Amino acid sequence: MKVLVPVKRVVDYNVKVRVKSDGTGVDIANVKMSMNPFDEIAVEEAVRLKEKGVVTEVIAVSCGEAKCQETLRTAMAIGADRGILVETSEELQPLAVAKLLKALVDKEQPQLVILGKQAIDDDANQTGQMLAALADLPQATFASKVEVAGDKVSVTREVDGGLETLRLSLPAVITTDLRLNEPRYVTLPNIMKAKKKQLDTFKPDELGVDVAPRLKTLKVAEPPKRGAGIKVPDVATLVDKLKTEAKVI
Amino acid sequence: MTVLVIAEHDHATVKPATLNTVTAAIACGSGDVHILVAGANAAEAAAAAAKIAGVAKVIAADSASLAENLAENVAAQVLAIAGNYSHILFPATASGKNVAPRVAAKLDVAQISDITKVDSADTFERPIYAGNAIATVQSSDKIKVLTVRTTGFDAAAAEGGSASVENAEGVADSGKSSFVGREVTKSERPELTAAKIIVSGGRALGSAEKFQEVMAPLADKLGAGLGASRAAVDAGYAPNDWQVGQTGKIVAPQLYIAAGISGAIQHLAGMKDSKVIVAINKDEEAPIFSVADYGLVADLFTAVPELVKAL
């Protein structure tokens, strides 16, 4: 059985982004880029399923500019067997990405698609659910445990108030939460091996998808700044300030 | 321009996140606000929704297929009536985030996630990059599908309205997913997203036992909700649904006390809109102090018990 794992190239999670002074976006020139952390968890999960013998092939997909190849190579260094790049310089919004992935699902017929639950740049948390809807597949978002048994998959999900478990018929879409697994470190030999793995490139129109953005970003601004307050010397002062100055207790 | 709110409920009561979503819905348009209560034996929840101030009509869809809030079925229920509305709003809770994109994709419209402000009927503000930037986005789609960050909007009054309740036929089960079980974290404490005071602990607590031993008495004393940093949750000191941050819960209580939390940007993203922030940390360079109104440089193992006594 095949697994498709979409991966997104994003600003590294350790980088504190700066808003451009003209308000058109955030400045990502010369900033470290990495694979979206949730997607790394998705790749790891797919590779573990392969190592358990449940899965035969792991295909990583990335949509965006040519540099997304680097992200695909990282996925292949973790253990994905091959990569697909959907190359475009257009701004891609979640609906467009979901449509591109739907076209690839039709082409590759995977039994599972595992995605990160959200990308840490636009924080949208949409693509997996949108793909599931477009491909008319069942979904389990925010997964913390995945078990495939026959033609079903049981997924434990992190929800408000605790955990819940669903059973989905395959094919299905899963999105990962933080505690699903801890991705392995990629080793140099595996990075070298990944360079030789197959990587195919498509353009959105080859897949018959219109990726034109639906949302227009009018402005990007700094959030209101919260100034640092004061340091208090001891607990007694703290309690006094909370009671008499902040009046919150 | 009628606006639809998808209620968050447990079939008997309407969850508070729905009230903030109603306020956002009122800001979206000049027309009526309707609420969909999709549930099983959920007449009580529908009756509660009808009392929310500002709501003109409750649509109650009652069906066994809606008992467990499965995304496939709930989305189908929303889609059955979606064409009547200019805006469809979900609270940005685990459940709302699960269902909304399915609805948007089927309608072939973009979704705008986690809105914190309505500028006009087609223009909204939302945080990106863990709240380090605020984007103003405009939608050209006919139906706007939105999820609402509850901390961005006041709660509508839960009482005072007298909406009509209209029954709608429940959708059939998709047959593709089924509910197996649920492990609910039992707690007498207020829910994080609704708590007036939150007491949060970090990795410095060192163990699940210490987390309970040190943080629980403070939460009890203040009647506060208990939160945790991602590091504390990953280490197993606290359950996952206590996590406050970019990818956990977004909270904005009157008072947020962070003990032993260094203040990674991902954590700050989840709590920096709190009215008053107190940080207790041994490391005086910890980034949490840059957003704290009151900082106490101290060992939490002595300072927190002392605080419990002093309150």
Image (cartoon, coloured by chain):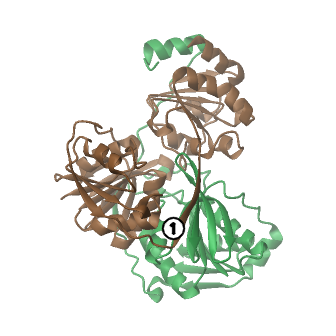
Task: In the picture, one chain is brown; tell me its letter.
Answer: B
Task: In the picture, one chain is green; tell me its letter.
Answer: A
Residue nearest the observer in this picture, A210 or A166: A166
> How far across and how far down the image is residue B113, in percent?
41, 56
- Is residue B45 toward the left or the right of residue B119 in the image? right
User: Can you say whether B275 is above or below A232 in the image?
Assistant: below
The residue depicted at 50 percent of the width and 52 percent of the height is: B129
> How far across and how far down the image is residue B66, in percent?
42, 60
For disc 1, the neighbor class at 10 Å (few under 14, some 14 to 19, many from 20) is: many
The residue depicted at 39 percent of the width and 65 percent of the height is: B75
The chain that hosts pointer 1 is: A
Residue nearest the observer in this picture, B309 or A203: B309
Residue B221 in sight from this viewpoint: yes
- Locate the N terminus of chain A by quadrant: bottom right
The residue depicted at 44 percent of the width and 12 percent of the height is: A244
> Is disc 1 placed on a helix, strand or loop?
helix
Indicate the amino acid at tag 1.
Gly
Which quarter of the picture shows residue B54? top left
User: Can you say whether A154 is above or below A158 in the image?
Assistant: below
> How far across and how far down the image is residue A217, in percent?
35, 60
The residue pinned by badge 1 equals: A128
Residue A33 in sight from this viewpoint: no
